[in-house]
Amino acid sequence: MNGKTVMACIDAAHAALVAHTDEIALLDQQIGDGDHIFNLLRGMEALVALRAQIESAAFGPALDLGAMKILSTVGGSSGPLFFSLLNGMAKAAASNTMDVAGFAAIFAAGVDAVGQRGKTGRGSKTMMDVLIPVAQRFAEMAAAGASAAEVRDALPQIAEASMLATRDMLATKGRASFLGERSRGHIDPGARSSQLMIAASCARLGQTL
Ligand code: ADP
Ligand code: MG
């Protein structure tokens, strides 16, 4: 894991978001204000423009560069939340090993930081409904001694099932909560974007590691 790995994941996440732009725009039009994917794509394009710096940095500093860029380019609620994810991971990177157990702990620290920033856990129909189950499965697999390949296969599956489960939830956080019961029946856009980025990163890591 180094800056090149971070950039490879950014490229994969970016491509997945580009491919699903219309779908995510529609989800945020249904229960939000429609800007989620455009906020994210702006951030991703800024990260791509930082390629040389990210690729030449070590793993933690590369995440930190990405976090700061996201904070300054992604608007809406999701800017500070994705900043917290990367910043939380960057802080944890220094004290963890670059193996399955270490990376599970690093990811969990990022997800904890999102929870503190957004003041929510599972069940309020947000990106946390994908991030938390993925972090938990990752930790369980790491504790059970799973290989990196097993983790890369399993996490996209739990991410997808968790994303789909947001459809029937009642939104109690963020803009979608203004809709009350009318928020049911639509997948949360942040859950969809998070799931796509997790799946794309796992697939990309499978090619390189
Ligand atoms: P905004 O709602 O301000 O327009 P975005 O459209 O960028 O922000 O992002 C919306 C997404 O942010 C939602 O789909 C949801 O997943 C996520 N979100 C909103 N509020 C929170 C929160 N408090 N904690 C975690 N995620 C949240
Ligand atoms: Mg929005």
Image (spheres, helix red, strand yellow):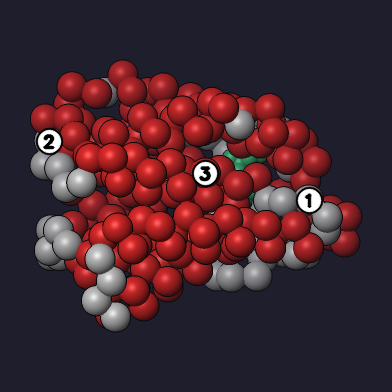
Q: Is residue 66 visible?
A: no
- Label 2 vs 3, first from the N-terminus: 2
Q: What's the mark number on residue 57?
A: 2
Q: Inspect the image, locate mark 2, and give the three-letter code of the amino acid beneath it.
A: Ala
Label 1 SS: loop
Residue found 33% across the figure and 63% down from its top: 150
Which of the two residues, 75 or 30, is positioned nearer the viewer here?
A: 30
Query: Residue 151: x and y, percent?
Result: 34, 62
- The residue carrying mark 3 has its beta carbon less than 8 Å from ligand 1: no
Circle 2 or circle 3, nearest the eye: 3
Q: What's the mark number on residue 186?
A: 1
Q: Say how many tags the image has.
A: 3
Considering only vertical position in the picture, is 128 above or below 33?
A: below
Assess whether mark 3 and mark 1 are in contact (beta carbons under 8 angstroms): no
Q: Residues within 10 Å of mark 3 (few under 14, many from 20)?
A: many
Q: Which residue position is annotated with label 3?
A: 196
Residue found 77% across the figure and 45% down from its top: 31
Considering only vertical position in the picture, is 192 above or below 39?
A: below
Label 3 SS: helix
Residue found 22% across the figure and 70% down from its top: 101
Query: Residue 106: x and y, percent?
Result: 26, 62
Q: Residues within 10 Å of mark 2 (few under 14, many from 20)?
A: some
